[in-house]
Image (cartoon, coloured by chain):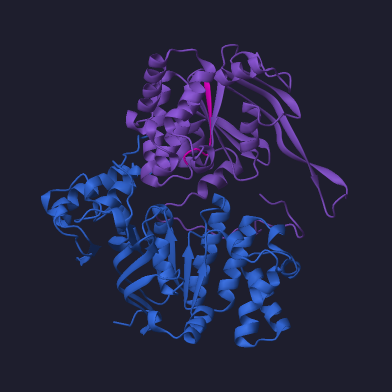
Chain colours: A purple, B blue
Amino acid sequence: MSNEVLVVEHLRKEFRRRRGAPGGESQHLIAVDDVSFAVAPGGALAIVGESGSGKTTTARMIVGLEWPTAGSISVAGRVRSARRVPRRERKLRGREIQIVFQDPYLSLDPRQTVGSCLDEVLRFHFRWDSRTQQQRREALLAHVGLDARFASRLPRSMSGGQRQRVAIARALAAEPQVLVLDEAVSALDVSVQAQVLNCLADLRAETGVSYVFISHDLSVVRQISDDIIVMKSGKIAERGRTDVVLDAPQSDYARELLASVPRPGWHPRRRVVAASATPGPEPVG
Amino acid sequence: MKDPLLRLQELCLWLPVKGGLAPILEDVNFTIHRGEAFGLVGESGSGKSMTARCISRLLPRGAKVTGDVLLEGVSTLSLTPRDLRAVRSSKVQIIFQDPRAHINPVRRVGDYLTEVLVTERGVEQDVANRRAIEILETIGVTAASTRLAQYPHEMSGGLLQRIMIAAALLVEPELLIADEPTTALDVTTQADVVALLDDMRRDRGLALLFITHDLELAAAICDRTGVMYAGTIVEVQTSAMLHQRPLHPYTAALLAARPSLTAQVRPVTISGSPVALADAPAGCTFAPRCAYQDSRCRLERPTLREGGVGSVACVRAHEIASQLAVVAESARG
């Protein structure tokens, strides 16, 4: 197991949540409960589940945006130990793992050109002369299927799919070993989503980067991942090879998810118990 | 043949932009019969939502509309404000994608549900409340009476979407317009909402205009589906046949671009990106991205022509029909 690029063991995250009136008793919401997995170099793991299943919290803990309540994460063989770390360590971590978010309209600076956005990352991590840096910048753009002229463009002059490819190029600029993609193609139109999916498949084949792919879309996951984890209420409901799980799901929950995917001739029946069976206020989001 | 419930005739729409009007819709034609579910699919910016908004005239100030929208033979475009209000509160109801943006956050859910009944129809408040509770129970909302006293922020998105559906059904409309009603929902909740809409259609003879970007979803719900691209309808036919034998290259390309659930196959991309009608070329709007385009496609914009099985706006439709069927077949895997 020592050659795995990402190892997550017994990960747990609790959030304190106040109920009722302000100052009332607080209670713990367990967002992630005993989650363990590993990703091999060049591998692609999908984490699927519905909203509130803990998949995004897991992603945020892996990249260090949230701190686990318990459990361990190690990336590229180094355990993420201290909560506060010096700049040098943060820089090292940036070379190990990067994340791409769902909405490129929010994750790119609207006033920064694409070229400057990539240069910023390249300057921070590498000391290259300007010629090498420019070559690297163009290579990054080429990797995601954009030509060199895009360097001078601002996000507003680009389509959603082009922006998301810039976000992917920016994440790859630090040459990470693991790329976390949190619903990275969910907001894209079908024709554009196909372009970005193919781009991601090619990048993995060319660079050997590993993916942790967070999604609710089982069809997308089928195309992009080798292994899959199905999460429900913070726990892993099922795991295995993506094709095996999607062709013959063993858990009731995975079966239910698959049965809910629309297709021609699909006639869903209303579940007897509605999604909101418990009266009274329920958690939002 | 019966008169359709809704008929859109050569509907064109322009919206005000800096320095003039931008074309948004061009020659949109379709009909919906009573009890029928009609799907409108397309990518963002293709004009699906604006088409829906034209029907109940929910348009921004300065919008210019030509053509006609006939609801039971009456043009909604020329209604007086008073008659329009009556249509909006009784015959046509719209469910939007984001219930949180369309339900007043500072009013109780009960007020939102009963507003039309109480203010427009003069129903007593407690009678209206009882009917609201009844309908919430029909659509599977538990503890319905408690719900009426709650505020939108106390509910999840899926529950709030049901509230919006309940509000639409309470006035017993003839036509329900559902604009991406399930896009923001989880798949299992989506299945619930779809099943619910289907039941309502069967039980009440409700006609449904279902707007979505998801071809599979449209196929599952709708009898017929229209495909929109750059403000025009490029194809209309039965949902089942649309998947087996698409008539327009764009429909076939959309089917091939959708990642498969059952096999790992590289999705076939459509070159370029979707355009708005204002930026579309002179000929066929899809021509620059189309794998089958030839010189004729650039000359003149094709209109939607009635064929034996459906309607299509493509000059090469006959020549390429068999090729498109093959594309659709391989997309199904």
Q: Of A66 and A9, which appears nearest the observer?
A: A66
Residue B206 in sight in this render:
no
Q: Which residues are magenta?
A: A176-185
Q: Of A233 and B227, which appears nearest the observer?
A: B227
Is A179 contained in the magenta span? Answer: yes
Quarter of the image with the C terminus of chain B in it: top left
Q: Quadrant of residue B116?
A: bottom right
Q: Of B274 and A6, which appears nearest the observer?
A: B274
Q: Residue at x 55, y 60 (%)?
A: B193
Vertical comparison of A194 with B70: above or below: above
How far from the left and from the top, in percent, is residue B199? 52, 68
Vertical comparison of B124 with A33: above or below: below
How far from the left and from the top, in percent, is residue B283? 19, 56
Q: Residue furthest left?
A: B295
Judged left or right of residue B9, residue B126 is right
Residue B54 in sight in this render:
yes
Total residue callouts: 0
Judged left or right of residue A11, residue B222 is left
Q: Residue at x 39, y 57 (%)?
A: B219
Is B180 contained in the magenta span? Answer: no
Quarter of the image with the N terminus of chain B in it: bottom left
Judged left or right of residue A165, residue A83 is right
Vertical comparison of B151 with A3: above or below: below
How far from the left and from the top, in percent, is residue A203? 41, 25
How far from the left and from the top, in percent, is residue B65? 34, 73
Q: Residue at x 49, y 39 (%)?
A: A111
Q: Residue furthest front?
A: B19
Vertical comparison of A150 with B171: above or below: above
